[in-house]
Amino acid sequence: MAGPSRKDAYIGNPEIFIKLMGSIDTFIQQNNENVRKVDDWMFDVENELQKIKELLEQRVMDAHTKLQNADFELNMCRSMPSYDSENRPQKPNCSSQESARLKAKRQLDVAQKNLNQMNELLRYAQKFAREYDDKKQNFVKLLDNKLPSSVSTLHKHHQIMQEYLNLNINRNGEK
């Protein structure tokens, strides 16, 4: 198949190159701004997730301390001598301390489970951030390298078109 004929190669309005160059510049500026906005948003989300993780870590530590205290109280109760009304030794009634210990253990289990889920969420978020960063780097390279070279190429074509028009050649190739 043959290429375009000479008459098809004629461009009547060379200002199209200026418009294309301006469009590319605007595209680059807008997308650099959009990338910055996404980076800022991701930074904010990462900080929020980190604050939540720290809160959950504090809850695990508090629950652990509460369990240790409940264990201590239960051990103290079990070690205290107890006597019936006739002064015979008997097993002490530590049901409230046992109940408090079970409650503290459940709280620790729930706090640990929540922290584990948060750590899993953070691993997922970090994986997403790494994937985003790889794609962003490719996109930024395109914005910083490829598109400006396209503008440069368009500028060269615009200069060529201006010189062509300065020759006063009409569409039929006559001077």
Image (cartoon, grey):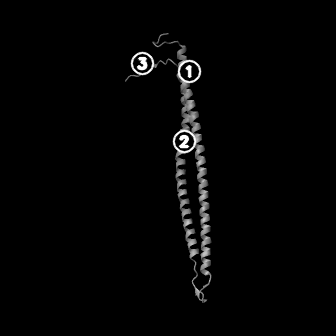
Circle 3 packing at 10 Å, graded few (<14), some (14-19), many (20+), is: few
Q: Position of residue 61 (x, y in %)?
A: 61, 64
Q: Residue at the far front: name it.
A: 85
Q: Which residue is mark 3?
A: 5
Give the mark nearer the N terminus: 3 vs 2. 3
Amino acid at circle 2: Lys
Where residue 111 appears, as percent x and y from the top left, is: 56, 62
Where residue 68 sits, quadrant-wise, is bottom right
Q: Which residue is mark 2?
A: 136
Residue 147 seen anywhere in this rendered image of the structure: yes
**SS at circle 3:** loop
What's the CA distance linking mark 3 and mark 2?
42 Å
Residue at image point 53% right, 29% down: 150
Amino acid type assigned to the residue bearing label 1 in the image: Gln
Q: Residue furthest top?
A: 175
Q: Is residue 26 above or below residue 104?
A: above
